[in-house]
Image (spheres, rainbow, N blue to C red):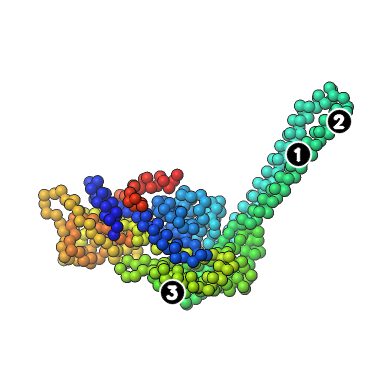
């Protein structure tokens, strides 16, 4: 545990009358970890941050100069990224994209849309055609406006100089001026033609900016690793079935010609995998499948997005071995062949980047016994950090002793016993840790839940029972921290 984390908690509790409840995000720790991860990645690989793990604007800001871009799964997430940067590359995924979302994603310049079904592909084609038609209409209107402007110039010229030409000038001079006018008029027409040519050139150039997509494929394979969360290799709401790849490609070639650009493929078969070797083997399978489709259908492939799924453990066992994984990637011949053809391999990781650098801290407000068992009640719980309830695990924690006790009566405590650490909600499911062994835990002490940077606050039912939200604090490279209001203001600039 960094000394700066303990220092931040100490400062926090000393400045509060109410029981402490807060998240602390170590932005400097996130940045350092990502730098180390990038340092071991092969040349044609790119790292994106999947913001579903934690979309806090300060985290997005911290990662902006480091990662290739961000992966989002809704327009809400997309707008969070665009509030921080209008230019950074965005991958837009998710199985239930609405037509309005697809239109907005295109308007906001996403790099690639992950197509999850044939119906979604058809919707994108319709939207792309409408967009192309609108673009063409705008070009025609632009040409007409220029032509109208030229006609107005001719009319103004005639009105100003016509009377003088007829009355004051001799025929020879009049003829000379008329020839001058004709020369101007012809040059104006030539300029319009040049403008038309430029618009036509822009239109041709625009064809290179079709809506770019990656087909998300659900492979039919028994070779994929198995984890608690499986999204591919069997019946799933995610992705296009492998057997429908040919139909999707034909649909793009026929219906989407000129407006849709198939840039590659996307895979995301599982989540929270701990085995780096199996993960590398899975990536090899992805690349081999893409090579097969390239040869079979004559496809240029710019990108293979191999998704995320890199695991984090919460029980003290070893987590995902990133250096081993990237060393296996370096040796991969399939990856090398992709690189030789100019293709890039993308990864979109969320949990692995931020989980270890978030801390949820909550003060103990009561300790009591029930049927011979001890319960420590927190100012907080699963409405702030739902991950332990969602995954059914005991969340790792440490205890920070405090002197926060102002009463004359005895301070409740549990010493050298097992205790259930529970939240303030009116439900028995509000439990952070069962049968935790503690040397000493007292009312007023603070429980610090480690590994709370990913899928903790984000997935929680924040407003159940209407309890106040926690405060948010951020550790930067100089160990300063700021409050949540300042953080969200900085993200909206």
Q: Earlier in the sequence, mark 3 or mark 2?
A: 2
Q: On residue 444, which mark appears?
A: none
Give the secondary structure at mark 3.
Answer: helix
Looking at the picture, how far across and down is residue 159, in whole percent?
A: 77, 28
Q: Which residue is mark 2?
A: 175
Q: Image quadrant of residue 193? A: top right
185 left or right of 440 in image? right
What secondary structure is found at the residue carrying circle 1? helix
Q: CA distance from mark 3 to mark 2?
A: 87 Å
Quadrant in which the C terminus is drawn: top left
**Residue sitting at x 39%, y 69%:** 321
Q: Residue at x 13, y 49 (%)?
A: 407
What is the quadrant of residue 50 in the picture?
Answer: bottom left
Distance from disc 3 to disc 1, alpha carbons, whole Å, reads 68 Å
Quadrant for residue 194, please give it: top right
Quadrant of the drawing holding the N terminus: bottom left
Residue identified by numbered label 1 = 188
- Per the rendering, the mark at residue 278 is 3
Q: Residue furthest right?
A: 171
């Amino acid at each position: 545990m960094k000394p700066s984390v303990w220092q931040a908690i100490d400062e926090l509790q000393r400045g509060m009358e109410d029981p402490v409840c807060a998240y602390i995000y170590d932005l400097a720790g996130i940045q350092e970890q990502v730098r180390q991860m990038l340092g071991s990645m092969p040349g044609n690989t790119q790292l994106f941050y999947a913001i579903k793990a934690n979309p806090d604007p300060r985290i997005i800001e911290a990662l902006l100069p480091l990662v290739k871009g961000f992966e989002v799964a809704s327009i809400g997430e997309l707008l969070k990224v665009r509030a921080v940067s209008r230019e950074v590359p965005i991958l837009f995924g998710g199985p239930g994209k609405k037509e309005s979302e697809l239109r907005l994603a295109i308007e906001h310049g996403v790099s690639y849309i992950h197509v999850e079904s044939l119906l979604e592909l058809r919707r994108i084609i319709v939207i792309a055609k409408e967009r192309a038609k609108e673009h063409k209409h705008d070009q025609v209107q632009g040409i007409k406006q220029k032509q109208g402007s030229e006609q107005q110039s001719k009319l103004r010229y005639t009105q100003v100089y016509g009377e003088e030409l007829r009355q004051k000038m001799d025929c020879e001079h009049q003829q000379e001026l008329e020839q001058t006018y004709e020369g101007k008029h012809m040059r104006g027409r030539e300029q319009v033609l040049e403008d038309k040519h430029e618009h036509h050139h822009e239109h041709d150039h625009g064809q290179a900016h079709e809506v770019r997509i990656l087909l998300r494929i659900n492979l039919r394979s028994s070779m994929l690793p198995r984890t608690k969360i499986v999204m591919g290799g069997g019946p799933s709401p995610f992705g296009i079935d492998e057997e429908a790849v040919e139909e999707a490609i034909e649909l793009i070639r026929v219906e989407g010609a000129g407006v849709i650009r198939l840039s590659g493929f996307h895979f995301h078969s599982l989540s929270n995998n701990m085995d780096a070797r199996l993960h590398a083997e899975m990536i090899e399978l992805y690349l081999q499948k893409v090579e097969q489709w390239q040869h079979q259908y004559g496809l240029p492939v710019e990108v293979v997005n191999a998704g995320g799924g890199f695991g984090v453990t919460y029980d003290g066992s070893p987590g995902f071995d990133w250096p081993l994984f990237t060393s296996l990637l370096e040796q991969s011949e399939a990856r090398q062949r992709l690189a030789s053809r100019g293709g890039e391999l993308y990864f979109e990781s969320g949990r692995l980047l931020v989980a270890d650098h978030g801390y949820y801290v909550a003060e103990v407000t009561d300790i009591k016994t029930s049927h011979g068992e001890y319960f420590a009640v927190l100012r907080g719980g699963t409405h702030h950090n739902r991950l332990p309830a969602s995954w059914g695990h005991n969340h790792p924690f440490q205890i920070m002793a405090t002197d926060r006790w102002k009463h004359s009566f005895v301070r409740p405590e549990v010493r050298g016993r097992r205790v259930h650490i529970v939240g303030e909600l009116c439900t028995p499911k509000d439990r952070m840790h069962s049968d935790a062994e503690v040397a000493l835990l007292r009312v007023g002490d603070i429980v610090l839940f480690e590994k709370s940077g990913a899928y903790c606050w984000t997935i929680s039912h924040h407003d159940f029972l209407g309890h106040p939200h926690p405060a948010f604090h951020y550790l930067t490279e100089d160990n300063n921290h700021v409050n949540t209001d300042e953080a969200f203001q900085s993200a909206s600039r």
